[in-house]
Image: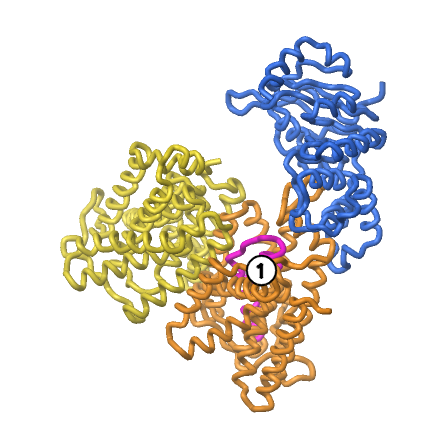
Chain colours: A orange, B yellow, C blue
Amino acid sequence: MMSKEALLNTALMALLLLVPLGAWFADEPFLITLTTRAVIFGIAGIGLNFALGLGGLVSLGHAAFFGLGGYVMGVLAYHAQTYTSLMTWPFELPGTTAMTIIWLVAICLSALLALGIGALSLRTSGVYFIMITLAFAQMLYYFAISWPAYGGEDGLSIYVRNRFVGLNTMDPIQFFMVCYGLLLLVLGLVWAMARSAFGLALGAARQNEERVRALGQKPQRLYLTAFVISGAITGLAGALFADLNRFVSPTMFSWQTSGEIMIFVILGGVGRVFGPVAGAALFILLEYSLGGLSDYWHVYLGAILLGVVLFARGGIYGLIAGREVAHD
Amino acid sequence: MSLVLFIEQVLNGLQFGVMLFLMAAGLTLVFGVMGLINLAHGSLYMVGAFAAAATAAATGSFVLALIASLVFAAFAGVLIEVLVIRRLYERDHLDQVLATFALILIFSEGTRWLFGSFPLFLDKPDWLSGTVGLPFGIVYSRYRLAMILVGLAVAVGLFWMIAKTRIGIRIRAGENDREMIAALGVNISLLHTFVFALGAALAGFAGALIGAIQSVQVGMGEPVLILAFVVIVIGGIGSIKGAFVGALLVGLTDTLGRFLLPVLFRLAMEPSAANAVGASLASMSIYLLMAGVLLFRPRGLFASQ
Amino acid sequence: MTDPILEIRGLTKSFGALSVSQAIDLDLRPGEIHALIGPNGAGKTTLVKQIAGALQPDSGSVRLAGQDVTRLSTAARARLGMGRTFQISSLAMDYTVLQNTVLGALCHRGDVFRFFRPVMKDAALLEAARRALDEVGLGALEAQRTSELSHGQRRQLEVASALTLEPKAFLMDEPMAGLGVEGSQHMMGFLDSLRDRAPILLVEHDMDAVFSLADRISVLVLGEIIASGSVSDIRSNPLVRSAYLGEDEAA
């Protein structure tokens, strides 16, 4: 017999698959794109949730990784499409339009950035950590604005979506399937990691650092590793998001982006593997329905968020699947 | 590069730093006394600027506009403290971040709804326009000089209040031991509301002062909020002195970085590239400063612990 | 005489004008239970913290199995064989009893950075964890959430967790507190048998337990060891009697 949470997971994933398929039959490409956004935001949220839910690290700067992933896509594709090199010294480095390579680069660079930001931010904790992660993301935001080579404030457009072997990625449903496949992969990996030795130790550090130290492990190393994995996942989402829009701009680095990624996590339910996916889907749904209702839909979003924080702290998953996070 | 130009930039840095202090002081007090991280502090800054711009438009008086910024920001502060913030003191930082983030959304869109999307302008009064001659042949904006002086006066007032007055003693007691202050029979919830309103008024005041040299628009508060966070990280949470030193450091680093770095790179590069590299690096300079402080003093320069 | 496992020399610590540890000498030899007693506020907890590595002494040294660990972190000391239980239970409260114990076994084995294999299906870890739980008498409660345990059961879980580390020395801060009569009896019997595996530095308030378990007793008063010796030495020591007289009346 399936638990309520497993049931909710299945329903959610089925819905995310059936809506675009239905839209494909009905020839409603906009709806496919909307779901693709939800899927990509879901991946970004899963990344943050790995640090936040499992490790208790309240990062308000995940836009740094989302934006970096976006710029990796933009810069590599820009150079490939203009037949220029990224650099010529000490060796020549061309751009690429192959999605898989872009993803790999986005993941690696985001992980590296997370290592740097994490190593500095994790020297502190609590409220310092929140402010510092926010500040570092803001630094990259201003850097992206003031660096003129890749469009500065205006951002960077690429004209054709990048390639994926055997697919026509410009076809919305095919690109959706790519993103959905990646979502499944990321979910599987995070699911496994949450149950692994590392997941057990990280969760213990979140609950009680002293315990982990008394057992001979350093919480900071666990946190840093979690932060790096978390950044890498969100970076991948950033590359996909930029590819979806065929456009990247400093906005991806902005504090609003960090806040929104956190909202995905909270709306869904902190610490639930599938929570951010539900949160992102709900966010897109709200944006779509409330955005049609009023230009000022953020007021309603703010009110809903406030309500969730003050009165329904478990998010969707908390409301439906019960307050406790499952253990096995 | 002339020395006069350099000194002018130093003054600009001071002016920026003093305004940052007005923002950071409220944030750090609220954190120190109530243990709350308040992202909506930038919204209070915006409320002050809008209140000032609207009042100036209606009455034509700059002084009334400044008073309005203090009153409205303090009022908005009391309102959100009583309705929302109060419920967050015992919550974890994540809940505080989210709820105050939600407040930003509500404040921003609410202001957009009230005032529209176009920026408002708040004009400097005539008696503060133009320039003023300083020693050594330095000519400086009268308004900016006034900002420095007013900001310093507020800082002195704040230090005095915390060090010498009854309310200041209670605030300090609240920072050290939240239970003790309740045991002393102080009305703790009134004290919290007061501290929050004070911080809000300072932020609103800064918003109004800066509003007269920049445009008044939705979203103006958050970049300043993040800079104030940098200030607090550098100065150490809960320390007014730290906020002051941190604010001046950040103000000077940012202003002088923007001024000096392109000049520096021009020594080694062609001018357009030097300007680009210099500007990009300058935009990162305060964050690099923060990273440096983190390496050596993870709890800030004036950490209370 | 064999070399001590734990050797504390001249440990001194003060907070401002308040001296909490004054040139403390203490050692723990193989096979013994060495009890540390003293009235409230004597500085037992700060001493334990310095031995465990949670607090740096101003001067003096701590040696574990012949190695100077004075400058090492808590984590490093734990890896070298210090098994600590806390006065106020320090456990992962959202985890089950079994998860908490598997965590100990995992940290002892050291391969924390494994990302894909489900840790709660690791036979070796499960076996080590269940053995430890059975030893402290918590075997039947392995699926219970730690936050739902009684205070006494949490103490038992603390000990089980320390057991999974297979330490060279135990540092136990009031393991009997909150255990009740039956629980105390069981725990005493267990600690009695444990001393052959690794010696125990036992901080304990329960004098009956101390007098029946300890091979040696050291008495800490106002940051100073005023007496150290066998149970009968301590019972008859006039200094100790006067130090405890006040406490007995107050209690």
Viewer-nearest residue: B185 or B98: B185
- Image height of A33 relative to C156, above or below: below
Residue A288: percent from left, percent from top: 47, 77
Can residue B263 be seen in the rendering of this structure?
A: no
Task: Answer left or right for C119 relative to A152.
Answer: right
Task: Answer left or right for C140 relative to B95.
Answer: right
Callout 1: chain = A
- Residue A242, by quadrant, is bottom right
Graded by Cα atoms within 10 Å as few (under 14), some (14 to 19) or many (20 or more), the crowding at tag 1 reads many
Q: Is residue B186 magenta?
A: no
- Residue B168, by quadrant, is top left
Disc 1 is placed on an element classified as loop
Which residue has dot 1 on it?
A: A270
Residue drawn 69% across the image and 57% down it? A327
In the picture, which quadrant includes the C terminus of chain A?
A: bottom right
Count of labels shown?
Answer: 1
- Residue A265, by quadrant, is bottom right
Name the residue furthest bottom. A26
- Image height of B163 relative to B192, above or below: above
Can residue B104 be seen in the rendering of this structure?
A: yes
Please provide the residue range marked out in magenta: A49-78
Name the residue type under label 1: Val
Residue A92: percent from left, percent from top: 63, 68
Q: Main secondary structure of the magenta part?
A: helix
- Image height of C95 relative to A282, above or below: above
Task: Answer left or right for B132 relative to C101.
Answer: left
Viewer-nearest residue: B294 or B167: B167
Viewer-nearest residue: A148 or B168: B168
- Image height of B24 relative to A301, above or below: above
